[in-house]
Image (tube, rainbow, N blue to C red):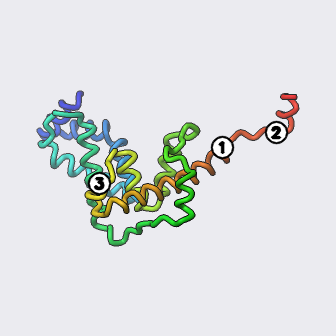
Amino acid sequence: MHDLELVEGCLKGQSSAQYGLYQRYGSQTFGICRRYSSDQMEAEDLHQIGWMRVFDKLSLFRNEGVLGAWLRKIFVSVCLNAYQKKKSKLQWYSISNEDSAAIQVADPAIPTDFLELEQLAKLISQLPEGPRLVFNLFAIEGMNHKEISQALEMSEETSRQQLRRARITLSKQLTLTKETTQPVFSKADNSKTK
């Protein structure tokens, strides 16, 4: 079935169409929830809430764009709503002078040529919540600092600092990962090259 057929079936209450839609997009939407969540259980809760919202709002989908993009907006919105509920507990990180110096030498474009996408996602998930949230909105959702500051009700400078914190932390993690994944030659290997 095509996306439009699945949507039409869902609107008619066909459970097979609902299941088909979930099967087609479930892993992508769970990936969104996982990126914004602090743990697996929270991601599962957000995923369930997101799908309930999808089926509740599906009549608003006008087939004027890609269904996957429409779903993505819903799930990001669900994740941001969850953030709004717990933001008083969220810890924002400031940048120290030492970190500011690291920003000057750190490559702002995170080098990922040696990493699998899954490894990179794992490193991102290990970021503290504030920097992880801003990094996801900036690097993955494509939002600018003005949009992020409005969505998260913070200043643009706080958004920039959280992104810097995320980049510094990821850069350090990537350097460690790269060093541990470099091939190590044994003495026997060295003798072959002589």
Q: Label 1 neighbourhood size at 10 Å, few (<14), some (14-19), many (20+)?
A: few
Instruction: Residue at 53%, 41% (x, y): give it.
Output: 112
Q: Are marks 1 and 3 in contact (CB under 8 Å)?
A: no
- Count of marks overlaid on the render: 3
Q: Nearer the viewer, residue 65 or 59?
A: 65
Q: CA distance from mark 1 to mark 3?
A: 38 Å
**Is residue 187 something one can see in this rendering?**
yes
Q: Are marks 2 and 3 in contact (CB under 8 Å)?
A: no
Q: Which residue is label 1 attached to?
A: 181
Instruction: Residue at 46%, 54% (x, y): give it.
Output: 125
Q: Label 2 neighbourhood size at 10 Å, few (<14), some (14-19), many (20+)?
A: few
Which of the marked residues, 1 or 3, is nearer the chain's N terminus? 3
User: Which SS class for mark 1?
Assistant: helix
Q: Which residue is label 3 attached to?
A: 146
Up the image or down, 67 lies above or below 168; here it is above
Q: CA distance from mark 2 to mark 3?
A: 52 Å
Q: Which residue is label 2 attached to?
A: 186
Q: Which of the two discs, 2 and 3, sits closer to the camera?
A: 3
Q: Percent x, y for residue 47?
A: 31, 52
Which of the marked residues, 1 or 2, is nearer the chain's N terminus? 1
Q: Amino acid at mark 3?
A: Lys
Q: Percent x, y for residue 93?
A: 45, 66
User: Which SS class for mark 2?
Assistant: loop
Q: Quadrant of the C terminus?
A: top right
Q: Amino acid at mark 1?
A: Thr
